[in-house]
Amino acid sequence: DAGITQSPRYKITETGRQVTLMCHQTWSHSYMFWYRQDLGHGLRLIYYSAAADITDKGEVPDGYVVSRSKTENFPLTLESATRSQTSVYFCASSLAGSSYNEQFFGPGTRLTVL
Amino acid sequence: AQSVTQLGSHVSVSEGALVLLRCNYSSSVPPYLFWYVQYPNQGLQLLLKYTTGATLVKGINGFEAEFKKSETSFHLTKPSAHMSDAAEYFCAVTPNDYKLSFGAGTTVTVRA
């Protein structure tokens, strides 16, 4: 199906474990984004990517790693998960970098770190 | 730097009543402004956006918002609430680049 998908939708892990959240889009959008959503904070940008092999930090990048070897995929890795990383994670994509272009959001991944 | 303040984390309205969600922003340059809606267990969906031109912007599902530069506001309204409007609403701002800054969100409850 066309669109933007995230997997898994739900994940429970333990402190110190490595976790990778997957994001896949079928529109060939150049820009992709990772946000985390926490109560009282809205959405905060973790990392973004302007194209394959081009990534940059957002507002809250510490503890996260991203890669983008293919245009359609933008995985987010928590190298050593901490309880403070319990959150809902959203991936988004945009046709280009201009704000004229809407960001399309995936359904989210709810991550719990015990 | 830009920031967004949404006044009221929860709003409860009766079905058929006016929905008013408040958003104020700060931006060092003329901003682009957005309202997104999030239904339970779903991602965010764009309701409407202001970039340039007409300051009254109409969006989907009967929502509209007015950009008031003098008040640095971008309040969202809908004349008559429907049960299906129950959701969380986010205001966002960008200074003409790809990075969005979001408000904390307002949860709307619609009473029958």
Image: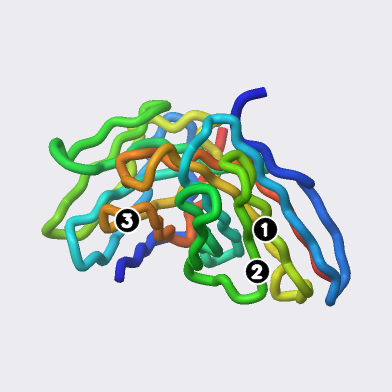
- Residue sitting at 65 percent across and 66 percent down? A65
Q: Nearer the viewer, mark 1 or mark 3?
A: 1
Label 3, label 2: how far apart the Cα atoms are? 24 Å
- Residue sitting at 43 percent across and 60 percent down? B103
- The numbered mark, 1 or 2, whose residue comes first in the sequence reads 2
Q: Which residue is mark 1?
A: A76
Question: Taking A40 as reference, is B44 above or below it?
Answer: above
Which picture quadrant has residue A101? top left
Circles 3 and 2 on the same subunit: no
Q: Which residue is mark 3?
A: B94
Judge left or right: residue A99 versus residue A89: left
Q: Amino acid at mark 1?
A: Leu
A98, A105: nearer the viewer:
A98
- Quick one: quadrant of the C terminus of chain B? top right
Q: Nearer the viewer, mark 3 or mark 2?
A: 2
Q: Amino acid at mark 3?
A: Thr
Q: Total marks drawn?
A: 3
B64, B2: nearer the viewer:
B2
Q: Which residue is mark 2?
A: A64
Within 10 Å of disc 2 (Cα), the crowding (few <14, some 14-19, many 20+) is some
Question: Taking A18 as reference, is B75 above or below it?
Answer: above
SS for callout 2:
strand
